[in-house]
Amino acid sequence: NLQDEIQGKSNAELLKMAYQFDQWSPEMLVEVEKELMKRNILPGDLNARRQQLIDTEEARLIKGKPAGLFGQILGWATVFGFLGIFIGYHYAFSKKRSNYTGKQYFTYNEPSRKSGTYLLYAGIFLSLAALLYKL
């Protein structure tokens, strides 16, 4: 049980866990804070530090990262097959979960997602056209 595990930890261990936001799940951190409040040793600066880390991470996640050039070239080179469709889907719809809040964000930036969407739909259309042509 999560509560039993937390109750068995020393004050120093709980304080260390409370400041290591990125190493614990949000559920675990909530339980750690509850236990620190019960013990009356919850640090006052904890929420401010957490909010600063959340804001920094959110700014990075909202922006997203650019798609890799190799992946884009491979996707367009294999647009007639499942690999191209898969790569397009990956760039268009893959998401990443925040370490601190559990909220999901798109992994790739807007231009990469748009390119991935084009690749996905082109792959589906061309694969269906090729399949219908063979029939």
Image: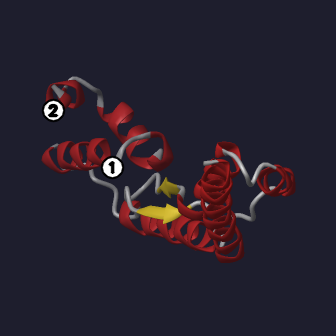
Residue that carries the numbered disc 2 in the rendered image: 3
The location of residue 65, given as percent across then percent down, is 70, 64
Q: Is residue 108 visible?
A: no
The x and y percentages for residue 113 are 64, 69
* Disc 1 secondary structure class: helix
Q: Quadrant of residue 7?
A: top left
Residue at the location (65% across, 74% down)? 114
Residue at (34% x, 56% y) in the render: 43
In this rendering, would 31 be left or right of 80?
left
Q: Amino acid at mark 1?
A: Pro
The answer to whether 34 is drawn above or below residue 122 in the figure is above
Q: Which mark is residue 26?
A: 1
Where residue 88 sits in the image (x, y, percent)?
Answer: 65, 58
Q: Is residue 80 above or below residue 116?
A: above
Label 1: few (<14), some or many (≥20) within 10 Å?
some
Give the residue drawn at x 21%, y 23%. 8
